[in-house]
Amino acid sequence: MIKNIAVIKGDGIGPEIVDEAIKVLKKVEEVYEHTFNLNYVKAGGEAIDAYGECLPEATVEACLASDSVLLGAVGGPKYDVQPPNNRPEKALLGIRSRLGLYSNLRPAKLFTELKDASPLKPEIVEAGIDFMVVRELTGGVYFGDHVTTSENDVEVAYDVMKYSAPEVIRIAKVAFETAMVRNKKLCSVDKANVLDSSKLWRKYVLEVAKDYPEVELTHMYVDNAAMQICKDPAQFDVILTENMFGDILSDEASMITGTIGTIPSSSLGEGTRGMYEPIHGSAPDIAGQNKANPIGTILSVAMMLKYSFFMEKEAQAIETAVQKVLDDGYRTGDMMDKHTTLVGCKEMGDLIVAAIA
Ligand SMILES: NC(=O)C1=CN([C@@H]2O[C@H](COP(=O)(O)OP(=O)(O)OC[C@H]3O[C@@H](n4cnc5c(N)ncnc54)[C@H](O)[C@@H]3O)[C@@H](O)[C@H]2O)C=CC1
Ligand SMILES: CC(C)CC(=O)C(=O)O
Ligand SMILES: [Mg+2]
């Protein structure tokens, strides 16, 4: 099969982790006789450095012309002085929006080999951590008006969190469908005791629920959800939530699995073209030191193969290879625990490539 992939390395650890993911993709290409045409384009800080703008139109066009997009991460202190509309993060939001990628799936699954890396008590970890965060990705406060102004000579700022009924309905459908192929439990997380946008959210989640009588639906306020993820993560199967809550809760959920460094994500819209990226950021504190964990990006490639290209066995081969390398005791620094072998980003990539049959 021939597939065209737009590749955005981005900033900080982005280039390092993407290089390892590409090695994995090339191994899959060789073993399974596919052709992956890679089109390297820039977004975020790397695009500001090269062209002065965080999201050149040529990058968007290359993404739109591709079968899918692989992204490392964007941002870093160097770019914090940029005006709001030219920050690297704005490029990421721009791609998500221009490609219509409203549905972000972020798994929180504990590799049993990493149970000692989890900060939770052993008895909580033993109960199991395996849930999916379905995060709305193109609405909410990240896409509302952002205003800094002055009122009565006092500086004020506000950001608008807005949702429309169709936006809630389409992401709720994704979450119910996700629950249907898992354990048929869906927890919708909102702040409906305070926010109008959450009241609307809950109303339309309840509407969509009528089409999925087999799914057990519960609602939880986001503050409680943050607590329950630490206290009793085994209660969750699928969590559905809006953009910012999902951003925050998925970072928390990653940490209880040991590290943010292993968690991939898919971002999809109506078609099969998606963007695939680890859930973490550009980790400027460890950039350029061969310390980054490339597993989140490598597993994002596996998600791309599964969700966009329907290459089930190839995706499985990557997941099995990651599992084997962890079984063999290799770890990057972020998931280091007793009796394991510390390796760098590049070595971790090489080990996973070698483990792909
Ligand atoms: N998708 C994206 O491109 C995202 C970009 N960002 C941007 O990234 C920059 C840094 O943001 P932070 O808040 O520090 O979040 P971050 O996720 O980059 O880093 C948080 C902590 O996790 C560690 N970490 C993250 N990924 C790791 C990996 N693969 N291996 C080992 N350790 C890892 C970092 O070293 C750091 O200690 C900011 O400019 C931010 O805006 C933040 C989140 C998402
Ligand atoms: C960098 C932001 C735009 C978003 C974010 O933190 C994320 O999607 O994980
Ligand atoms: Mg985030």
Image (cartoon, rainbow, N blue to C red):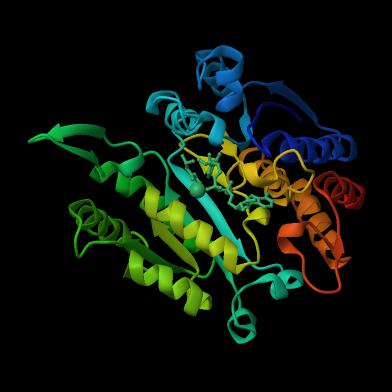
Residue occupying the far left of the picture: 152
In the image, residue 86 sits, relative to residue 228, either above or below, namely above
335 displayed left or right of 102: right
Residue at 26% across, 44% down:
161
Q: Is residue 216 visible?
A: no
* Image location of residue 55, percent across then percent down: 50, 21
Q: How many marks?
A: 0
Residue at 81% across, 41% down:
24
* Image location of residue 46, percent across then percent down: 61, 24
* Image location of residue 231, percent across then percent down: 48, 79
Q: Is residue 158 visible?
A: yes
Name which quarter of the figure residue 90 lies in: top left
Identify which residue, 177 or 158, lies in the foreground: 158
Residue at 83% across, 46% down:
349
Q: In what quadrant of the picture does the N terminus appear?
A: top right
Residue occupying the far front of the picture: 153
In the image, residue 230 sits, relative to residue 189, either above or below, namely below
213 displayed left or right of 99: left
In the image, residue 282 sits, relative to residue 322, either above or below, namely above
Name which quarter of the figure residue 326 lies in: bottom right
* Image location of residue 324, percent across then percent down: 85, 62
Identify which residue, 199 or 1, lies in the foreground: 199
Identify which residue, 229 or 171, lies in the foreground: 229
Residue occupying the far bottom of the picture: 123
In the image, residue 267 sits, relative to residue 64, either above or below, namely below
198 displayed left or right of 100: left
Identify which residue, 114 or 130, lies in the foreground: 114
